[in-house]
Amino acid sequence: MTRPDPNDPGLLTAAETSLLTDLYELTMAASYHREGMNEPAAFELFVRRLPPRREWLLVAGLGPALGLVSELRFGERELAYLESRGFEAAFLEYLASFRFSGEIDAMPEGTVCFGNEPLVRVTARRIEAQLLETLLLNQVNFQTMAATKAARVVLAAGGGEPGAGQRVIDFSPRRDHGIDAAMKVARSAAIAGCGGTSNVAAAMRYGLEPVGTMAHSYILSFPSEEEAFTAFLRAFPERGVLLVDTYDVEGGVRNAILAAEESRVPLRGIRIDSGDLDALSRRARDLLDRAGMNQATIIASGDLEEGRIADLVAAGAPIDSFGVGTDLGTSRDSPTVNGVYKIVAHADADGIWQGVRKLSLAKETIPGAKQVFRSFGRRGTMSGDVLGAADEDVPGQPLLEKVMRDGEFVAAESLEQLRARAEKSLAALPADLRRPSAEPAVEPYPVELSPQLSALAGAS
Protein backbone atom coordinates (compact mmCIF):
# COMPACT_ATOMS: atom_id res chain seq x y z
CA MET A 1 0.00 0.00 0.00
CA THR A 2 1.28 3.48 -0.86
CA ARG A 3 1.87 5.54 2.24
CA PRO A 4 2.25 9.31 2.65
CA ASP A 5 5.83 10.42 2.11
CA PRO A 6 7.06 12.01 5.37
CA ASN A 7 9.79 13.78 3.38
CA ASP A 8 7.26 15.52 1.14
CA PRO A 9 4.73 17.32 3.36
CA GLY A 10 3.68 19.77 0.64
CA LEU A 11 4.47 23.45 0.28
CA LEU A 12 7.83 24.78 1.43
CA THR A 13 8.28 26.56 4.73
CA ALA A 14 9.76 30.07 4.75
CA ALA A 15 13.18 28.65 5.61
CA GLU A 16 12.97 25.93 2.96
CA THR A 17 12.12 28.57 0.38
CA SER A 18 15.66 29.90 0.82
CA LEU A 19 16.82 26.78 -1.02
CA LEU A 20 14.27 27.19 -3.82
CA THR A 21 17.16 28.28 -5.98
CA ASP A 22 19.37 26.86 -8.66
CA LEU A 23 22.61 25.53 -7.20
CA TYR A 24 24.71 27.91 -9.24
CA GLU A 25 23.16 30.90 -7.47
CA LEU A 26 24.66 29.63 -4.23
CA THR A 27 28.02 28.64 -5.71
CA MET A 28 28.36 32.06 -7.37
CA ALA A 29 27.36 33.78 -4.14
CA ALA A 30 29.89 31.71 -2.19
CA SER A 31 32.64 32.65 -4.61
CA TYR A 32 31.68 36.34 -4.46
CA HIS A 33 31.83 36.11 -0.67
CA ARG A 34 35.24 34.43 -0.73
CA GLU A 35 36.60 37.09 -3.12
CA GLY A 36 35.12 40.01 -1.18
CA MET A 37 32.89 40.95 -4.12
CA ASN A 38 29.74 42.25 -2.51
CA GLU A 39 29.52 45.78 -3.88
CA PRO A 40 26.14 47.16 -5.04
CA ALA A 41 24.80 45.76 -8.31
CA ALA A 42 21.66 46.09 -10.41
CA PHE A 43 19.82 43.18 -12.01
CA GLU A 44 16.77 43.32 -14.29
CA LEU A 45 14.06 40.75 -14.97
CA PHE A 46 12.65 40.95 -18.50
CA VAL A 47 11.24 38.83 -21.31
CA ARG A 48 13.52 38.84 -24.36
CA ARG A 49 10.81 37.81 -26.80
CA LEU A 50 7.10 37.48 -26.28
CA PRO A 51 5.83 33.87 -26.17
CA PRO A 52 4.19 32.35 -29.26
CA ARG A 53 0.64 33.64 -29.88
CA ARG A 54 1.12 36.54 -27.48
CA GLU A 55 1.50 40.20 -28.45
CA TRP A 56 1.58 41.51 -24.90
CA LEU A 57 1.74 40.23 -21.33
CA LEU A 58 -0.13 41.20 -18.17
CA VAL A 59 2.29 41.46 -15.26
CA ALA A 60 1.46 39.37 -12.19
CA GLY A 61 3.22 37.60 -9.34
CA LEU A 62 5.05 40.57 -7.87
CA GLY A 63 3.11 40.62 -4.59
CA PRO A 64 3.74 36.96 -3.72
CA ALA A 65 7.35 37.30 -4.87
CA LEU A 66 8.02 40.29 -2.61
CA GLY A 67 6.42 38.49 0.30
CA LEU A 68 8.86 35.61 -0.16
CA VAL A 69 11.80 37.99 -0.54
CA SER A 70 10.94 39.80 2.69
CA GLU A 71 10.74 36.50 4.60
CA LEU A 72 13.83 34.88 3.07
CA ARG A 73 15.86 33.20 5.82
CA PHE A 74 18.35 30.34 6.00
CA GLY A 75 17.41 28.11 8.95
CA GLU A 76 19.61 25.67 10.85
CA ARG A 77 18.45 22.70 8.79
CA GLU A 78 19.12 24.49 5.51
CA LEU A 79 22.57 25.63 6.67
CA ALA A 80 23.42 22.10 7.79
CA TYR A 81 22.43 20.79 4.39
CA LEU A 82 24.60 23.34 2.61
CA GLU A 83 27.49 22.45 4.92
CA SER A 84 27.08 18.80 3.87
CA ARG A 85 27.40 19.94 0.25
CA GLY A 86 30.80 21.49 0.90
CA PHE A 87 30.04 25.18 1.44
CA GLU A 88 32.57 26.98 3.64
CA ALA A 89 31.84 28.02 7.20
CA ALA A 90 32.42 31.73 6.54
CA PHE A 91 29.80 31.75 3.79
CA LEU A 92 27.34 29.79 5.92
CA GLU A 93 27.85 32.33 8.70
CA TYR A 94 26.93 35.06 6.20
CA LEU A 95 23.80 33.17 5.17
CA ALA A 96 22.77 32.63 8.80
CA SER A 97 22.11 36.37 9.12
CA PHE A 98 20.92 36.90 5.54
CA ARG A 99 18.14 39.45 5.09
CA PHE A 100 17.34 41.25 1.87
CA SER A 101 18.14 44.91 2.48
CA GLY A 102 18.13 46.34 -1.03
CA GLU A 103 15.79 48.14 -3.38
CA ILE A 104 13.27 46.78 -5.88
CA ASP A 105 11.53 48.76 -8.60
CA ALA A 106 8.92 47.05 -10.73
CA MET A 107 5.96 47.37 -13.04
CA PRO A 108 2.96 47.00 -10.72
CA GLU A 109 0.77 43.94 -11.16
CA GLY A 110 -1.95 44.48 -13.72
CA THR A 111 0.32 46.44 -16.09
CA VAL A 112 0.53 45.46 -19.76
CA CYS A 113 4.12 44.95 -20.91
CA PHE A 114 6.08 43.95 -24.01
CA GLY A 115 9.30 42.20 -24.97
CA ASN A 116 12.66 43.47 -23.63
CA GLU A 117 10.97 45.75 -21.11
CA PRO A 118 12.23 45.33 -17.52
CA LEU A 119 9.44 44.10 -15.26
CA VAL A 120 11.56 44.09 -12.11
CA ARG A 121 14.83 45.83 -11.22
CA VAL A 122 16.76 44.78 -8.12
CA THR A 123 19.46 47.07 -6.73
CA ALA A 124 21.31 45.57 -3.79
CA ARG A 125 24.57 44.09 -2.63
CA ARG A 126 25.70 41.67 -5.32
CA ILE A 127 25.13 38.52 -3.26
CA GLU A 128 21.68 39.61 -2.14
CA ALA A 129 20.61 40.46 -5.67
CA GLN A 130 22.05 37.24 -7.09
CA LEU A 131 20.25 35.03 -4.61
CA LEU A 132 16.83 36.40 -5.65
CA GLU A 133 17.10 35.26 -9.28
CA THR A 134 15.41 31.87 -9.21
CA LEU A 135 12.72 32.94 -6.76
CA LEU A 136 11.70 36.02 -8.75
CA LEU A 137 11.67 34.17 -12.06
CA ASN A 138 9.68 31.30 -10.55
CA GLN A 139 6.98 33.65 -9.29
CA VAL A 140 6.77 36.31 -12.01
CA ASN A 141 7.10 34.05 -15.07
CA PHE A 142 4.33 31.65 -14.09
CA GLN A 143 1.85 34.15 -12.73
CA THR A 144 2.34 36.53 -15.66
CA MET A 145 1.61 33.61 -17.97
CA ALA A 146 -1.60 32.82 -16.08
CA ALA A 147 -2.75 36.43 -15.83
CA THR A 148 -2.14 36.99 -19.54
CA LYS A 149 -4.21 33.96 -20.49
CA ALA A 150 -6.99 35.00 -18.14
CA ALA A 151 -6.95 38.53 -19.56
CA ARG A 152 -7.36 37.15 -23.09
CA VAL A 153 -10.34 35.10 -21.93
CA VAL A 154 -11.87 38.12 -20.19
CA LEU A 155 -11.46 40.22 -23.33
CA ALA A 156 -13.05 37.47 -25.42
CA ALA A 157 -16.05 37.30 -23.08
CA GLY A 158 -16.53 41.03 -23.53
CA GLY A 159 -16.29 41.02 -27.30
CA GLY A 160 -12.80 42.50 -27.20
CA GLU A 161 -13.65 45.07 -24.52
CA PRO A 162 -12.50 44.86 -20.87
CA GLY A 163 -14.92 44.96 -17.98
CA ALA A 164 -16.61 41.63 -18.75
CA GLY A 165 -14.65 39.69 -16.14
CA GLN A 166 -17.74 38.82 -14.14
CA ARG A 167 -18.67 36.56 -17.05
CA VAL A 168 -15.57 34.38 -16.52
CA ILE A 169 -15.09 31.84 -13.73
CA ASP A 170 -11.82 30.09 -12.92
CA PHE A 171 -12.60 26.35 -13.10
CA SER A 172 -8.93 25.32 -13.29
CA PRO A 173 -7.65 23.83 -9.99
CA ARG A 174 -8.12 20.20 -11.02
CA ARG A 175 -6.01 20.86 -14.12
CA ASP A 176 -3.38 23.13 -12.55
CA HIS A 177 0.16 21.89 -12.03
CA GLY A 178 0.05 21.43 -8.28
CA ILE A 179 -1.29 23.10 -5.15
CA ASP A 180 0.68 26.34 -5.35
CA ALA A 181 -0.14 26.69 -9.05
CA ALA A 182 -3.87 26.38 -8.31
CA MET A 183 -3.67 29.15 -5.73
CA LYS A 184 -1.60 31.47 -7.90
CA VAL A 185 -3.75 30.87 -10.99
CA ALA A 186 -6.85 31.90 -9.04
CA ARG A 187 -5.11 35.06 -7.84
CA SER A 188 -3.73 35.89 -11.30
CA ALA A 189 -7.13 35.28 -12.90
CA ALA A 190 -8.72 37.61 -10.37
CA ILE A 191 -6.20 40.35 -11.22
CA ALA A 192 -7.06 39.90 -14.90
CA GLY A 193 -10.74 40.43 -14.04
CA CYS A 194 -12.29 36.98 -13.60
CA GLY A 195 -15.42 37.13 -11.49
CA GLY A 196 -14.98 34.03 -9.33
CA THR A 197 -13.22 30.73 -8.78
CA SER A 198 -14.21 27.17 -8.02
CA ASN A 199 -11.11 26.98 -5.76
CA VAL A 200 -12.49 27.46 -2.25
CA ALA A 201 -9.05 27.74 -0.62
CA ALA A 202 -8.13 30.56 -2.99
CA ALA A 203 -11.49 32.24 -2.44
CA MET A 204 -10.89 32.27 1.30
CA ARG A 205 -7.26 33.42 1.09
CA TYR A 206 -7.72 36.17 -1.47
CA GLY A 207 -11.28 37.24 -0.75
CA LEU A 208 -12.66 35.96 -4.05
CA GLU A 209 -16.15 34.76 -4.90
CA PRO A 210 -16.43 30.94 -4.65
CA VAL A 211 -18.53 29.61 -7.53
CA GLY A 212 -19.71 26.11 -8.33
CA THR A 213 -22.63 23.93 -9.28
CA MET A 214 -22.44 20.12 -9.24
CA ALA A 215 -20.78 17.24 -11.07
CA HIS A 216 -22.36 14.61 -13.32
CA SER A 217 -21.65 12.09 -10.54
CA TYR A 218 -24.19 13.89 -8.38
CA ILE A 219 -26.90 13.47 -10.99
CA LEU A 220 -25.99 9.81 -11.52
CA SER A 221 -26.26 9.16 -7.78
CA PHE A 222 -30.05 9.61 -7.85
CA PRO A 223 -32.76 7.48 -9.47
CA SER A 224 -33.63 10.33 -11.83
CA GLU A 225 -32.35 13.71 -12.93
CA GLU A 226 -35.39 15.51 -11.54
CA GLU A 227 -34.89 13.89 -8.12
CA ALA A 228 -31.26 15.01 -8.13
CA PHE A 229 -32.29 18.57 -8.95
CA THR A 230 -34.99 18.59 -6.30
CA ALA A 231 -32.57 17.35 -3.64
CA PHE A 232 -30.00 19.97 -4.56
CA LEU A 233 -32.53 22.81 -4.49
CA ARG A 234 -33.74 21.55 -1.13
CA ALA A 235 -30.19 21.63 0.25
CA PHE A 236 -29.10 24.90 -1.38
CA PRO A 237 -32.13 27.04 -2.21
CA GLU A 238 -29.95 30.14 -2.59
CA ARG A 239 -27.47 28.47 -4.97
CA GLY A 240 -29.81 26.73 -7.35
CA VAL A 241 -27.64 26.38 -10.46
CA LEU A 242 -28.18 22.96 -12.02
CA LEU A 243 -26.04 20.94 -14.44
CA VAL A 244 -28.33 19.91 -17.31
CA ASP A 245 -26.25 17.91 -19.80
CA THR A 246 -25.83 14.55 -18.03
CA TYR A 247 -28.35 12.89 -20.37
CA ASP A 248 -29.95 15.37 -22.73
CA VAL A 249 -29.73 19.15 -22.42
CA GLU A 250 -33.28 19.96 -23.46
CA GLY A 251 -34.64 17.29 -21.14
CA GLY A 252 -32.31 18.52 -18.42
CA VAL A 253 -33.60 22.07 -18.70
CA ARG A 254 -37.20 20.82 -18.54
CA ASN A 255 -36.39 18.77 -15.43
CA ALA A 256 -34.67 21.77 -13.84
CA ILE A 257 -37.78 23.86 -14.44
CA LEU A 258 -40.04 21.16 -12.98
CA ALA A 259 -37.81 20.73 -9.92
CA ALA A 260 -37.82 24.47 -9.26
CA GLU A 261 -41.58 24.75 -9.70
CA GLU A 262 -42.34 21.77 -7.47
CA SER A 263 -39.83 22.88 -4.83
CA ARG A 264 -41.05 26.47 -5.03
CA VAL A 265 -37.41 27.53 -5.11
CA PRO A 266 -36.14 30.07 -7.68
CA LEU A 267 -33.97 28.49 -10.34
CA ARG A 268 -30.81 30.61 -10.28
CA GLY A 269 -29.40 29.13 -13.43
CA ILE A 270 -28.25 26.14 -15.42
CA ARG A 271 -24.85 24.93 -16.62
CA ILE A 272 -24.17 23.28 -19.98
CA ASP A 273 -20.88 21.37 -20.09
CA SER A 274 -20.86 19.82 -23.56
CA GLY A 275 -22.25 19.90 -27.09
CA ASP A 276 -23.07 22.77 -29.42
CA LEU A 277 -23.10 25.54 -26.84
CA ASP A 278 -24.56 28.12 -29.22
CA ALA A 279 -27.59 26.06 -30.26
CA LEU A 280 -28.10 24.49 -26.82
CA SER A 281 -27.94 27.82 -24.98
CA ARG A 282 -30.53 29.30 -27.36
CA ARG A 283 -32.91 26.40 -26.80
CA ALA A 284 -32.33 26.53 -23.05
CA ARG A 285 -32.97 30.28 -22.98
CA ASP A 286 -36.23 29.79 -24.85
CA LEU A 287 -37.42 27.09 -22.45
CA LEU A 288 -36.49 29.14 -19.38
CA ASP A 289 -38.17 32.27 -20.68
CA ARG A 290 -41.34 30.36 -21.62
CA ALA A 291 -41.45 29.10 -18.03
CA GLY A 292 -41.21 32.65 -16.73
CA MET A 293 -37.67 32.09 -15.43
CA ASN A 294 -36.08 35.04 -17.21
CA GLN A 295 -33.76 35.61 -14.26
CA ALA A 296 -32.16 32.18 -14.57
CA THR A 297 -28.67 32.48 -16.00
CA ILE A 298 -26.84 30.14 -18.37
CA ILE A 299 -23.28 29.06 -17.62
CA ALA A 300 -21.21 27.31 -20.28
CA SER A 301 -18.16 25.15 -19.61
CA GLY A 302 -16.23 22.31 -21.19
CA ASP A 303 -12.74 22.92 -22.67
CA LEU A 304 -13.41 26.58 -23.35
CA GLU A 305 -10.70 29.03 -24.43
CA GLU A 306 -10.72 32.58 -25.76
CA GLY A 307 -11.20 31.69 -29.42
CA ARG A 308 -14.28 29.58 -28.80
CA ILE A 309 -15.66 32.11 -26.34
CA ALA A 310 -15.16 34.93 -28.84
CA ASP A 311 -17.07 32.95 -31.47
CA LEU A 312 -19.97 32.38 -29.07
CA VAL A 313 -20.08 36.05 -28.10
CA ALA A 314 -19.93 37.16 -31.74
CA ALA A 315 -22.77 34.77 -32.61
CA GLY A 316 -24.91 36.29 -29.86
CA ALA A 317 -25.27 33.05 -27.90
CA PRO A 318 -27.35 33.79 -24.76
CA ILE A 319 -24.62 32.66 -22.37
CA ASP A 320 -24.23 34.72 -19.20
CA SER A 321 -20.90 33.34 -17.98
CA PHE A 322 -18.12 30.97 -18.94
CA GLY A 323 -16.36 28.47 -16.69
CA VAL A 324 -12.81 28.04 -18.01
CA GLY A 325 -10.55 25.32 -16.66
CA THR A 326 -7.64 23.65 -18.44
CA ASP A 327 -6.79 26.47 -20.82
CA LEU A 328 -6.95 29.12 -18.13
CA GLY A 329 -4.82 27.20 -15.63
CA THR A 330 -2.20 25.88 -18.04
CA SER A 331 -2.28 28.43 -20.88
CA ARG A 332 -2.27 25.43 -23.17
CA ASP A 333 -1.65 27.31 -26.41
CA SER A 334 1.36 29.20 -24.99
CA PRO A 335 2.37 27.66 -21.66
CA THR A 336 5.55 29.52 -20.73
CA VAL A 337 6.89 33.02 -20.23
CA ASN A 338 10.65 32.87 -20.71
CA GLY A 339 11.69 35.73 -18.46
CA VAL A 340 15.39 36.18 -17.66
CA TYR A 341 17.29 37.95 -14.89
CA LYS A 342 20.51 39.70 -15.89
CA ILE A 343 23.06 41.95 -14.23
CA VAL A 344 23.11 45.36 -15.94
CA ALA A 345 25.37 47.47 -13.69
CA HIS A 346 27.62 47.37 -10.64
CA ALA A 347 29.66 49.78 -8.54
CA ASP A 348 33.45 49.69 -8.71
CA ALA A 349 35.83 49.93 -5.76
CA ASP A 350 35.37 53.71 -5.68
CA GLY A 351 31.56 53.44 -5.67
CA ILE A 352 31.26 54.56 -9.29
CA TRP A 353 28.50 52.75 -11.19
CA GLN A 354 29.51 50.96 -14.37
CA GLY A 355 27.13 49.44 -16.89
CA VAL A 356 27.78 45.82 -17.84
CA ARG A 357 26.47 43.91 -20.82
CA LYS A 358 26.30 40.47 -22.36
CA LEU A 359 27.27 40.04 -26.02
CA SER A 360 26.21 36.42 -26.64
CA LEU A 361 24.57 35.91 -30.02
CA ALA A 362 20.79 36.53 -29.79
CA LYS A 363 21.18 37.14 -26.05
CA GLU A 364 22.76 40.57 -26.03
CA THR A 365 21.84 42.95 -23.23
CA ILE A 366 21.96 46.73 -22.95
CA PRO A 367 24.03 48.04 -20.03
CA GLY A 368 22.68 50.18 -17.23
CA ALA A 369 19.49 50.41 -15.16
CA LYS A 370 16.47 51.09 -17.33
CA GLN A 371 12.97 52.53 -17.21
CA VAL A 372 9.98 52.14 -19.54
CA PHE A 373 8.17 55.31 -20.63
CA ARG A 374 4.66 54.87 -22.08
CA SER A 375 2.78 57.39 -24.21
CA PHE A 376 -0.97 57.58 -24.79
CA GLY A 377 -3.17 59.00 -27.51
CA ARG A 378 -6.05 61.42 -27.09
CA ARG A 379 -8.55 58.74 -26.06
CA GLY A 380 -6.20 57.14 -23.57
CA THR A 381 -5.04 54.44 -25.98
CA MET A 382 -1.44 53.33 -25.63
CA SER A 383 0.55 54.72 -28.54
CA GLY A 384 4.09 53.49 -27.87
CA ASP A 385 6.79 52.70 -25.31
CA VAL A 386 10.33 53.99 -25.06
CA LEU A 387 12.99 52.00 -23.23
CA GLY A 388 15.36 54.50 -21.66
CA ALA A 389 17.93 54.82 -18.91
CA ALA A 390 16.49 54.98 -15.41
CA ASP A 391 17.83 58.50 -14.93
CA GLU A 392 17.01 59.70 -18.44
CA ASP A 393 14.45 62.43 -19.15
CA VAL A 394 12.08 60.80 -21.65
CA PRO A 395 8.50 61.89 -22.44
CA GLY A 396 5.82 59.50 -21.23
CA GLN A 397 4.62 57.76 -18.10
CA PRO A 398 7.38 55.83 -16.28
CA LEU A 399 6.10 52.30 -15.59
CA LEU A 400 8.57 50.94 -13.03
CA GLU A 401 7.72 52.12 -9.52
CA LYS A 402 9.38 51.84 -6.11
CA VAL A 403 8.10 48.69 -4.38
CA MET A 404 10.84 47.92 -1.81
CA ARG A 405 13.39 50.13 -0.08
CA ASP A 406 15.90 48.88 2.50
CA GLY A 407 14.22 45.50 2.24
CA GLU A 408 10.85 46.89 3.32
CA PHE A 409 7.63 47.29 1.35
CA VAL A 410 6.98 50.81 0.14
CA ALA A 411 3.22 50.24 -0.02
CA ALA A 412 0.83 47.32 -0.20
CA GLU A 413 -1.96 47.11 -2.76
CA SER A 414 -5.29 45.38 -2.48
CA LEU A 415 -6.54 42.89 -5.04
CA GLU A 416 -9.21 45.42 -5.99
CA GLN A 417 -6.51 47.95 -6.87
CA LEU A 418 -4.69 45.37 -8.99
CA ARG A 419 -7.91 44.45 -10.80
CA ALA A 420 -8.67 48.12 -11.47
CA ARG A 421 -5.20 48.67 -12.89
CA ALA A 422 -5.51 45.60 -15.12
CA GLU A 423 -8.89 46.72 -16.45
CA LYS A 424 -7.49 50.18 -17.20
CA SER A 425 -4.39 48.68 -18.87
CA LEU A 426 -6.43 46.34 -21.05
CA ALA A 427 -8.79 49.16 -22.01
CA ALA A 428 -5.78 51.22 -23.11
CA LEU A 429 -4.54 48.53 -25.52
CA PRO A 430 -5.03 49.38 -29.19
CA ALA A 431 -8.16 47.62 -30.45
CA ASP A 432 -6.14 45.40 -32.78
CA LEU A 433 -4.33 43.95 -29.74
CA ARG A 434 -7.50 43.22 -27.80
CA ARG A 435 -8.91 40.66 -30.18
CA PRO A 436 -8.50 36.98 -29.22
CA SER A 437 -6.72 35.94 -32.40
CA ALA A 438 -3.63 33.89 -33.12
CA GLU A 439 -2.89 36.13 -36.09
CA PRO A 440 -0.33 38.88 -35.48
CA ALA A 441 -1.51 42.46 -35.36
CA VAL A 442 -1.30 44.43 -38.57
CA GLU A 443 0.81 47.03 -36.75
CA PRO A 444 2.93 45.62 -33.90
CA TYR A 445 2.98 47.79 -30.80
CA PRO A 446 6.01 50.12 -31.03
CA VAL A 447 8.74 49.74 -28.41
CA GLU A 448 11.74 51.93 -29.17
CA LEU A 449 15.08 52.72 -27.55
CA SER A 450 15.83 56.21 -26.29
CA PRO A 451 18.76 58.04 -27.91
CA GLN A 452 20.94 57.23 -24.89
CA LEU A 453 20.14 53.50 -24.99
CA SER A 454 20.41 53.42 -28.78
CA ALA A 455 23.98 54.63 -28.45
CA LEU A 456 24.74 52.05 -25.77
CA ALA A 457 23.12 49.24 -27.76
CA GLY A 458 25.21 50.13 -30.80
CA ALA A 459 28.47 50.21 -28.87
CA SER A 460 30.49 47.02 -28.93
Image (cartoon, grey):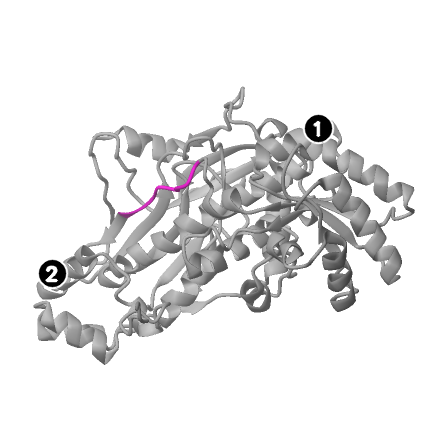
Query: Which type of secondary structure does the marked residue at label 1 adopt?
Result: helix
Circle 2: element type: helix
Q: Do the residues labelled 1 and 2 touch (CB within 8 Å)?
A: no
Q: Does the magenta stretch include residue 337?
A: yes
Compare residues 269 and 52 and report the one nearer the observer: 269
Residue furthest to the top in view is: 442
x, y percent for residue 190: 59, 54
For the record, the magenta segment spans 334-343
State left or right for residue 36 relative to residue 357: left
Residue depicted at x 56% and y 37%: 305
Using the numbered discs, state the Cα–Cα distance from disc 1 to disc 2 in whole angstroms: 59 Å
Query: What residue do we see at 52% from left, 65% from top?
Result: 411
- In the drawing, what numbered circle is on residue 314? 1
Coordinates of residue 440 in the picture (x, y in percent): 50, 23
Q: Say if residue 434 shows up in the picture.
A: no
Q: Which mark is residue 31?
A: 2
Q: Which of marks 1 and 2 is in front?
A: 1
- Tell me which residue sits at (22%, 56%) in the image: 22
Image height check: is 196 above or below 398?
A: below
Which residue type does callout 1 highlight?
Ala
User: Image check: 320 left or right of 119?
Assistant: right
Residue in the image at 51% along x and 42% along y: 327
Q: Crowdedness of circle 2 by 10 Å Cα count: few (<14), some, many (20+)?
A: some
The crowd level at tag 1 (other Cα within 10 Å; few <14, some 14-19, many 20+) is some
Residue 283 position, x and y percent, is 79, 35
Tell whether 94 sits left or right of 188.
Answer: left
